[in-house]
Amino acid sequence: MEGIQEVYEMVVKGKTKAVELAVQEALSGGSAPATILNDGMIKAMDEVGAQFKTGEIFVPEMLMSARAMKKGIEVLKPHLVTGAVGTAGKAVIGTVAGDLHDIGKNLVAMMLESAGFEVIDLGVDVSREKFAKTIEKNPDVNLVCCSALLTTTLRALRDTVAYLNRASFRKNIKIMVGGAPVTQALADEIGADAYTEDAAECARRARELVKE
């Protein structure tokens, strides 16, 4: 367990180089890859999320931890049973049509990966049709995250969710929305399954949602 504790601490501290070494050492010490992932990395990101929530750390630190986690997963991936990294499910994420903001969306994508999701990141200015086509091509998708950062693109967010709500695959997916001008009231009104204020909360809520 000592090796796993080291992985945990390096992810919490956002040490990308040290985490690679810690993962290697944990593997050499006989720790199971899935245990390193769950007890070392995912648990560490839960702690990072909790610290972000209470204001102990801020976005730059959270990004560093998410990057460290990503590095750790690169080392771990060849040793994991196929699909273990996507244990929580498969998510499609994008910023809606007309909106070119991506920092928040990128952070959410990293946090979702940290929470065990396989993530398909469609980028920015994503049309509702592109969201739908991607889900149709990937029938194992169980989560869709749509982001809008401008009040002027809330209409596109509304349109996208309405479009997905009419799709035949709607019963297989959960829709999450977020972004500065988005509120819980808006999420309820447009028929999304969940809204969260920040990336850390999004990852936690996403895991709950897909289990429902």
Image (tube, rainbow, N blue to C red):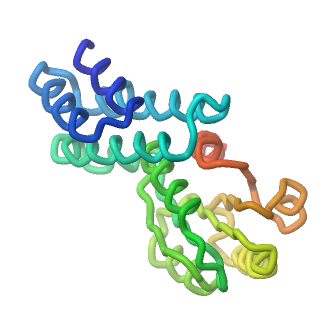
- Whether residue 207 is visible to the viewer of this picture, yes or no, is no
Q: Position of residue 112 (x, y in %)?
A: 50, 50
- Answer left or right for 92 relative to 189: left
Quadrant in which residue 151 is drawn: bottom right
Quadrant in which residue 35 is drawn: top left
- Answer left or right for 16 relative to 60: left
Residue at (66% x, 58% y) in the render: 174
- Answer left or right for 14 relative to 76: right
Residue at (59% x, 78% y) in the render: 100
Above or below — where is 51 with respect to 3? Answer: below
Above or below — where is 80 with respect to 180? Answer: above
Residue at (83% x, 57% y) in the render: 183
Q: Position of residue 188 (x, y in %)?
A: 87, 59
- Whether residue 147 is visible to the viewer of this picture, yes or no, is yes
Quarter that holds the N terminus: top left
Q: Where is residue 161 in the image (x, y as percent from the top left)?
A: 74, 73
Q: Which of 132 and 212 is in front in this view?
A: 132
Q: Which of 131 and 15 is in front in this view?
A: 15
Q: Where is residue 126 in the image (x, y as percent from the top left)?
A: 58, 81
- Answer left or right for 117 relative to 143: left
Quarter that holds the C terminus: top right
Residue at the left extreme? 28
Quadrant in which residue 87 is drawn: top left
Residue at (44% x, 67% y) in the render: 120
